[in-house]
Image: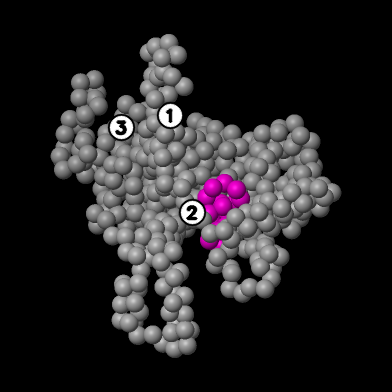
Amino acid sequence: MSQKSLPGDKCGTLDTLTELEKCIVSIAKEKRWKEIIPKEWSLIELALVTFKESSETDDMTERKRIMSVEELEREYWKTEKGNTNKIQDALRFLSDTGVILFFNEKDLSDTIVVDVQWFVDTFKFIISDKNHVRDLAKTDNDWQYFHRTGYLMGNFLHRIWESLSIRSWDSPTILQYMQRLGLLAIGEEKHYVPCMNKKDFGRKEQDTLREMETKSSVLVLHFDFLPFFFYCRLIVACIVGTEWKVLEDDGIPCLYKNIAIFVYKDHLIALVVTQTAIQVQILRPQNLPIDADIAVHIKETLENRLGYLTSTFHKKVAYKVAFQCSDQEVFCDNVGCYVYEEEICKKGQILCPRHGFTGKHMINEDALTKFWKTSSPSVSCTKSGKVPLTNEEKLQKLITLGRDAMQVYFDTMFPSEGLQKCLKGNKESLCNGPLDSQQLKLTLFIQLPWQL
C-alpha cells in the first residue's frame, strides 16, 4: 500500500501505516521463514491434520478436537521407541506456528488441541453469545450472576459443553488450556472469567479504602499501550500463580470490573487497572504496620508476573515505574498525578514535578518509595519494563531459545553433509568400543569441511 494514495491527515494515520509496513517487512525478513525442519515434523503435522479431518466426518457427538500425545506416538510410531522427546519438539514448533495448541508443562504435556479455531470459538461462545448462553442457564439467576460478576457456575458450564457437543472427559483439558492462556481461573464449583466482570467499585467500597488507617503509597506501572485483556490475564496469573488469595467480604469475592483485592499474610493488596496504568497499594486495618519485607515481596511477585506476560506479548507492552504524588487513592485514574521514579531518585524532598505551580506542594522521595524499596538492585524494575523472571520462567525461555540457537551453532560447526559422511566412516569404532575423546575430536577436525 502506497502512502501517496492516502490523503495527509493530522491524526498520525500515515505514521501508523509506516510502522505497520516496517513490521510486515521485518517479519518477512526473519530467518525462521528459511528454517529447515526435520522431515518427521512434517509427518507429525500431516498426522494431526488427518486426525482432525477424519473426526470432522464423524457424528457431532463423537467429534474429536483433542488428541493425546500417547495416541499420536502409538498410531504413527508403533515400531520405534524413545520418540517422546522428538514428538514434543515437533509439537512445540507446530504450536509456535499456530497449527495446534500444545504446552510442554505440567497438566498439559499429555494432550494436544488439534482444532485451534474450535477452541477459540468455544470460549467466544461463552463470553459473547449472550442470548444463546442465557437460554442454557438453569435459572435466570445463574446467568445474571455470571454476566455481572464473571463467575461461571460448574453446572452452567456443563450445559454449555453439552450444547457444543463437547465430550465430558475433554472438559478438564479445555479448562486447563483456558487457564494457561489467562482466559479464566479454575475453581472447585465455579470458574472466574475476568473479562465478564461488570461489578463497579462503588462509593461504599471507595470509602472503606479511604478509611484504612495504614496504607502504602500508590505504586504505578505506567504503560504506553495497555489492552484491557492484559489486565485480565494478570488477574488470572495472580489467582493461579501466586500465594495471594482473593479477599472475601461476607462470602463475596472482592473482584470488580477494574479492581481486584487480594490478601497475603494479613496485608491487603489493591490491584487496579486504568486506561494506561496498573496501580497497586498495600493496606492494613486497625492501624497495624506494613511489613517491609512483605511489601517488597508483593512488588517482586507482581513484577515477575508482569515480566512473564510482557515477554509473551507485543514488544511495546512495557511500563515505567511511577508513584501518585498526592492523594494516594489507588482507585483514582489521574495521569496528571504520576511522578516517575527517575524524576525523584536521590533527590530527597523536592517541589512536585507535576504541580509546582498550581498545587504548590512538596513531595518526599522516601515517603513514596520506602514501601517498595528492594535490598538488591538485581530485583529492581528497568525503564523498559523488563523484570527478572522466576526460575521456572527462565528455564522455559532457555528451552525455547536455546534449542534453536544450539541447532544453528551445531549446523555451522558440523555441516550436515560432512557430519553424516564422517560418522559413517567411523561407524565401526563408534559402535564397537569406546573411542578416545581426543581421537574423536581429531577425526572430526580433519575430516569435516569447516566453515569458519
Residue 50, compared with residue 259, is above or below; it is below
Mark 2 neighbour density, 10 Å: few (under 14) some (14–19) many (20 or more): few
Amino acid under disc 1: Leu
The residue wearing badge 1 is 20
Q: Which residues are magenta?
A: 88-105
Task: Tell me, yes or no, whether the two marked residues, 3 and 1, touch with CB atoms within 8 Å.
Answer: no
The residue wearing badge 2 is 36
Where residue 179 sits: x, y (%)?
58, 51
SS type, badge 2: loop
Q: Nearer the viewer, residue 122 or 377?
A: 122
Which image quadrant is residue 188 in?
A: bottom right
Specify whether residue 14 is in view.
yes
Mark 1 neighbour density, 10 Å: few (under 14) some (14–19) many (20 or more): few
At 41% from the left edge and 14% from the top edge, which residue is drawn? 4
Residue 432, compared with residue 415, is above or below; it is below
SS type, badge 3: strand
Q: Which of marks 1 and 3 precedes in the sequence?
A: 1
- Viewed as shown, does residue 257 lie left or right of 415? right
| Residue depth check, mark 3 versus mark 2: number of the one nearer the observer | 2
Where residue 200 sits: x, y (%)?
54, 32
The residue wearing badge 3 is 338
Where residue 132 sits: x, y (%)?
76, 34
Amino acid under disc 3: Tyr
| Residue 379 within the magenta-colored segment of the rendering | no
Residue 94, compared with residue 143, is above or below; it is below
At 69% from the left edge and 44% from the top edge, which residue is drawn? 118
SS type, badge 1: helix
